[in-house]
Image (cartoon, rainbow, N blue to C red):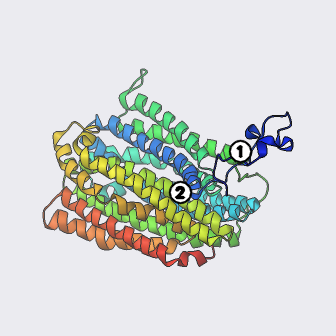
Amino acid sequence: MRPRGEGIPGAAADPASSGAAGLPARVAARPRRPRTLREEVTALAWPSLVENILQTMLGVVNMMMVGRLGPASIASIGVAQQIVFTLQVAYSGLAVGNTALVARSIGAKDPDQAQRIAKQSLLMGAAIAGATTAGGLAFADGAISLMGASPDMVELAVPYFRTVICGSLFMMVMFIGNGTLRGAGDTRLPMIITAVINLINLDIGYVLIFGKLGLPALGIDGAAIGNLVAQAVGSCIVLYVLFSGRSRVKLDWRGGWRLDPGLIKRLLNIGTPAAAEQIFMRLGMTTYSAMVISLGTLVYAAQQVIFTIVSFSFMPGFAFGVAATTMVGQSLGAKNAARAEESGWEATRLGIMWMSLMGVGFFLFAEPLMGLFTSDARVIAYGAPCLRLVAWAQPLQAFSMVLAGALRGAGDTRWTMIITTGSIWLLRIPLSYLFGIVLNLGLIGVWMGNSLDSTIRGLAVTWRYCTGRWQTIRA
C-alpha cells in the first residue's frame, strides 16, 4: 500500500488522469486510505469516552451539590445507589447479550436479525423493569436498613431510593437502546443522548436541591427527581432514534414483537452469566459498603468521594472496553478471528495508557481532588491516602476492564462472571475485612483489599483472553 500523501508517478503529465473539469491530477479525488486498527478502535472509543465523561461529570456535579448538604446526605445517596445498581443488573446483563448479538449480526451483514434481537431484548427488559420497580417500592425501608444505615441515613435515603427506582423502565430502555446502537458500531448517538439528559438532570437537580426559582428546597429528593425526569427524556430520544431509522438498526412497529424462544435462548446464554456477574459483583459491593458504613458516617462519606474520583479512571477503561466489545463481535460475525483478537489487544494498549495517566494524577493530587467534593478536613484525611493507594492498581485494572469487554463481545460471559465473582468474594471482601476491621487499619485497609482484588482480576482476565478459547464460542 502506498503511504498516505504520496503522489502517483507520472500522473501530472497524463491528461487522462486529470479531473472532469481539467484539474491537475494532484487535486483530483483520491481513494480514501483504509483506517488502521488503532484508528477504528479510537473512532469507536472516543464517543464512549466523552459519554462516560459526561455521565461521570453528572455524578461529580451532583455529588458537589449534595456535598454542600453535609456528610449524611452524601452517605445516604451512596447507600441508595448501591441498591439501585444491584436491582439494575438483570437488564444490564440482558443489554450485554443484546450488544454482542447485534454486533455479530451487523458483522454478518444481517440488519434484520439485529432488529429482531433488539425487539426481543426490549420485551424481556420491560418485564424485568416492572418487577424491579414493584420490588424496590415494596421493600425500600428494609433494604436500606439491611445495608446497616443509621436512622438519619434511612430517613434521607428511602425517599430518594423510591423516586429513582420508579425510573427503572426508562433506565432499561437506555441500557438496551444504547447497547443496540453500540453493537451496530454507532457510539456517537449514545454520547449525544447522554449530553442532553445530563443537562436536564443538572438543571432540574440544581433548582430542586437548593430551592431556586421560587420552589422549595428539596435536598437529595430534588436530585432524585432530576434523575427521574432526565431518564424519561433520554429513553424517549433513544426510542425515537431506533424507530425513525437514524441508526444502522431500524426498528418498526410491525412484527417481531412476539416472544421468540430461539432468540431469547441466545440472549440468555450470554445475558444470564453477565447478569449473574453483575449480581454477584453488586452484592459484593453492597457487603463491601456495609463494611465501610460500620466504620462511621465520615469514613463512608470519604469512601463515596473516592469512588466518585476513581470513576474518572474507569472512563477510558469503559470506552475502550465498548470499542473492544463492538469490534470483537463484528469481527467474529464476519468470520475474522485474527482481526477480533488484535482488536482486543489494541483497545487494551490504549486503555492502559490512559488509565495509567489517571493513576499518576490521583497520586500527585490526592488532597486537592478530595477537596473538590468536601470541605470537611476529616473526610479529606481519610480519603487522600486511599486515593494514592488505588493509583498503583490502574494499569492492571485496564486489562480487566478492556479485555473483559472483548470477551463479552465474543459471548464469553461465563468466564468473566467466574473471574469477577471469585475476585470479589474470595479476595476483595475477605482481604478488606482482614486489613480494615480485624487489623484495625480502617479505610486504608479496606482499600488495600480493593487494590489487591483489582490486580489479580486483571491478571485472570488476561489469562483467559490469551487462551483464545473465546474465539470458538457460538453466540
Q: Nearer the viewer, residue 136 or 2?
A: 2
Distance Cα–Cα, label 2 vs label 1: 21 Å
Report which quarter residue 160 is drawn in.
top left
Relative to residue 294, is residue 423 drawn left or right?
right
Crowding near the residue tagged with mark 2, few <14, some 14–19, many ≥20 C-alpha atoms within 10 Å: many
Q: Percent from the top left, x then y, of residue 459?
A: 37, 71
Q: Quadrant of the C terminus?
A: bottom right
Kindly check if marks 2 and 1 are in contact, taking CB atoms under 8 A apart as contact: no
- Residue 460, disc: none
Residue identifier under label 1: 246
Crowding near the residue tagged with mark 1, few <14, some 14–19, many ≥20 C-alpha atoms within 10 Å: few
Residue identifier under label 2: 322
The answer to whether residue 305 is seen in the rendering is yes
Residue closest to the far top: 214
Looking at the image, which residue is at 57% across and 65% down?
409
Relative to residue 138, is residue 271 drawn left or right?
right
Q: Percent from the top left, x then y, of residue 233?
A: 58, 39
Does label 2 or label 1 sit earlier along the sequence?
1
Residue type, label 1: Arg
Looking at the image, which residue is at 49% across and 78% down?
467
Q: Nearer the viewer, residue 306 or 217?
A: 306
